[in-house]
Amino acid sequence: MSETRRTTPTTTAPPTQPAGADFILRAHDVYKTYRMGRVDVPVLKGASIDVKQGEWIAVLGASGCGKSTLLHLLGDLDQSDPGKGEIFFEGEPINRRTRSQRNLYRNRTVGFVFQFYHLLPELNVLENTFIPALVGLTRFSYYAKRQEIHRRAEELLQSFGLGDRLKHRPQELSGGERQRVAIARALMNQPRVLLADEPTGNLDENTGGEILDLLAEQHRAGLTIVMVTHDRSIAGRADRIVELSQGRVVTID
Ligand SMILES: Nc1ncnc2c1ncn2[C@@H]1O[C@H](COP(=O)(O)OP(=O)(O)O)[C@@H](O)[C@H]1O
Ligand SMILES: [Mg+2]
């Protein structure tokens, strides 16, 4: 079969939100270079991506091409030298916000799912899930909201088929179960966008498929998802695939 795919650079629109555009999240002409000792390692070289409200977009790219770097910038997880370019959420550049607004963005606006789950081993499943809801609470306000917080976490876990695992520790769970807990944690504060970094990368095909089904269900319920992966068949579950190559995002059509 002949290769008919064509790659073109994505939009180079000015770094402001076009009037009426329904982009919820956008990276505009982002550069990122890591410094290794005395050597500069340029990773992103003018990457731009526009994420529409309610879409599921997959960023496909080879290992080491900068997918996690881009996702961390979108989620404002990278606190080091920002490099050039801007990340906009609903038209507002996130790096011009105050420190507390940025903390709120990380805690409330986006939810993050990682390949290796990043659950805390000393906490049980329920506690791991509700951690994001504790951020910024005083002891007093925690006690006032405790029941509500526990109920939300429990409902999420039950809907993910983990109702009988609430008191288990992460090491007592399978990989697929751990990732379901990690997704529940990411959804705890009802984020506007879910950022998923190779969410099935550590799972066998069937289990990975179940995790993608779960993401699809959230997407049908209206969640915007940005997922990065090196696997074309996994990317195929999204509404739209873009490719990260040589530090830039290119559309595939
Ligand atoms: N903190 C860091 N310091 C130095 N180099 C890094 C750092 N993080 C990532 N890199 C390098 O940047 C490149 C892109 O990394 P990454 O974004 O993790 O790629 P991907 O997620 O696509 O596998 C790789 O060459 C990696 O070694
Ligand atoms: Mg990565």
Image (cartoon, grey):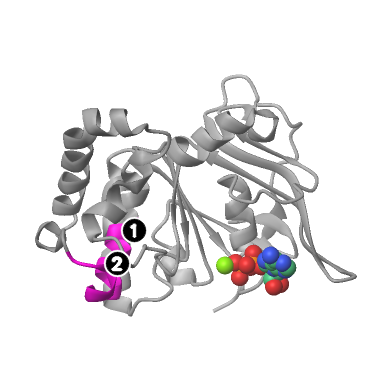
Q: CA distance from mark 1 to mark 2?
A: 6 Å
* Front-lying residue, 50 or 76: 76
Residue 209: quadrant of the picture:
bottom left
Q: Which residue is mark 2?
A: 178
Label 2: which secondary element: helix
- Residue in view at x 39 percent, y 60 percent: 237
Q: Tell me if 113 is positioned left or right of 78 in this view.
A: left
**Crowdedness of circle 2 by 10 Å Cα count: few (<14), some, many (20+)?**
many
- Give the number of the disc on residue 182: 1
Please name the predominant secondary structure of the magenta segment in the image.
Answer: helix
Instruction: List the single residue furthest toward the top.
Output: 19
- Residue in view at x 64 percent, y 51 percent: 78
Residue 124: quadrant of the picture:
bottom left
Residue 61 visible in this rendered orientation of the protein: no
Asked if disc 1 and disc 2 are in contact, CB closer than 8 Å, the reply is yes
**Residue type, mark 2 in image:** Arg
Q: Is residue 179 magenta?
A: yes
**Residue type, mark 1 in image:** Ala
Range shown magenta: 168-182
- Residue in view at x 35 percent, y 76 percent: 203
